[in-house]
Image (cartoon, helix red, strand yellow):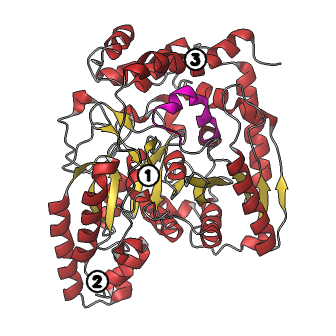
Amino acid sequence: MALKLGERVEYCLAVLVPRLLLALFKLLSPRRSGGSKRLPPIENPLLTLSAMQLAQKIRRREVTSVEVVQAYIDRIQEVNPLLNAVVKDRFSSALLEAAQVDKKIKENNEGEEVVKDRFPLLGVPLSVKESFSLEGMPNATGLISRAKFISSVDSPVVGLLKRAGAIPLGVTNTSELCMWLESNNHLYGITNNPYDLERTCGGSSGGEGSIIGGGAAVIGIGSDIGGSIRIPCFFNGIFGHKTTRGVVSNDGQFPEISGVRDNYLSTGPICRYAEDLLPLLKIMAGPNADKLSLSVKVDLKKLRFFTIVDDGGSLVTMPVDHQLIEAQKRVVARLEADLGVTVKEVSFPQLKYAFQIWNTLMALPDRDGKPPRPFVELMADGGSVWLIWEVIKSIFRRSEHTVAAIGFALFEKTQSSVPSPFILKQKEELQREMDELLGTDGVLLYPSHPVLAPKHHHPLFTPGNVAYTGIMNILNLPVTQCPLGLSKERLPLGVQVVAGKFQDHLTLAVAQHLEMTFGGWRDPGVV
């Protein structure tokens, strides 16, 4: 049984409503200037070391934490005026904390290994997505009504990283209420891509992607309910990991996740260097780290590899760019040549309904029958929002909310309260077949997104493209986003590496291999 006509119309609205809104408002948007500017290249060698390398040098007194923190502060001050990624800094506090670290190391009598075990990130700078509570920092997630809100405590994952010795430098921009694939809001403005300032950095963890991709942070924290870690990491040429659900705490974020959506939200690490992924995940997981086999050495030659080149032909997604297809083919060729494995091409007909599956499951009520909190209520933040009035105000540039947020709220109102049995069946079949395929030793290559980092606001034309990442949230599969060099336009290429539930260590191992093979992150100032 195929989708009924009404259901097809409903899902096509996912494309038509934002396109119509963009057509109305784009002509009224001011022209952006300075798009030809490029970031300056990295000159300080400290900025080219992984977090693990920096931690080791700090422990061994080869460099001080103050020197490392100051180097990153200098880089942020150099590039953030172009990127608008860090929306609030805590530089003074960070330097004081770095000085305390140096004093602690100088007075240490327990030996380097003891310090490494207790404080694996001691003295290493960290960036934090603004939607996470960080004591003393704003936690507005792009809402003007929350502009004066300051967090009084750390979210659990921030607390774990700080206790491991990491030093937060500040908080980074997001999309409004973290529900869009471009980091833009009317409180902090829009964040730019470090490889092309006229292009999007992605969302909702786009500020993290931009500042890390721009070489002004080395590690960070993101959250992902439909690709909000992986899309920014893809667009900004860095690594990110969507964890298996139930491993890393999602608490301490705004907005709070309601209804069944907590089943699909994942908090995970973002970084420039693949070797940082596993230790970061281990720290962020805390006591749940035992659910993963992070200490198990992975023999890549013993894994089963699979590849899917596209979604099989969806109503709402664009065709995969040929450069991304070719990049994925190069990965297949190198895996087969380097490891002596066979990478089998597979297909799942259910994937052409990936957006519909993601959208339907996101709207389901929880076990108690309580539906997710409506997006328009989140926009109101305790007040009231009349969407038609917001559309009118937006035309005259008077709304406090972005076109994307208004469009999403309007689309949400068009959704049927009764889920499609056909779509639910597609999800169950896909879940079963994917779990059987991957098992405990299977790895899948899948496109990160069908297009390269688009120009600002262009995602409004193609919101369905989120299907490539969103479906993995619904399937609860761990995914590592890996950079694969640059396109002819000098934009990042990449691929998702997927494994079975709780097999996160497999994708992290493949990420390190791909970094060695394809070079990993590239300095946008010298590309």
Residue 325 visible, this angle: yes
Looking at the rendered structure, which numbered label has been put on residue 231?
Answer: none
Q: Nearer the viewer, residue 101 or 405?
A: 405
Q: Is residue 21 left or right of residue 504?
A: left
Quarter placement of the N terminus? top right
Horizontal and vertical percent for residue 410?
47, 15
Residue at 74% over, 36% down: 351
Circle 1: is it few (<14), some (14-19), or many (20+) Cα within 10 Å?
Answer: many
The secondary structure type at the circle numbered 3 is: helix
Name the residue beneath numbered marker 3: 16
Q: Is residue 386 left or right of residue 444?
A: left
SS majority, magenta: helix
Residue at 34% over, 32% down: 185
Q: Earlier in the sequence, mark 2 or mark 3?
A: 3
Horizontal and vertical percent for residue 294?
57, 68
| Residue 214, above or below 100 | above
Amino acid bearing label 1: Gly
Q: Earlier in the sequence, mark 1 or mark 3?
A: 3
Q: Earlier in the sequence, mark 1 or mark 2?
A: 2
Q: Nearer the viewer, mark 2 or mark 3?
A: 3
Circle 3: is it few (<14), some (14-19), or many (20+) Cα within 10 Å?
Answer: many
Name the residue beneath numbered marker 1: 209
Cα–Cα gap, marks 1 and 2: 26 Å
Name the residue beneath numbered marker 2: 63
Residue 373 visible, this angle: no
Amino acid bearing label 2: Val
Are the two marked residues, 1 and 2, in contact with CB atoms closer than 8 angstroms?
Answer: no
The secondary structure type at the circle numbered 1 is: helix
Q: Which residues are magenta?
A: 454-469
Is 455 magenta? The answer is yes
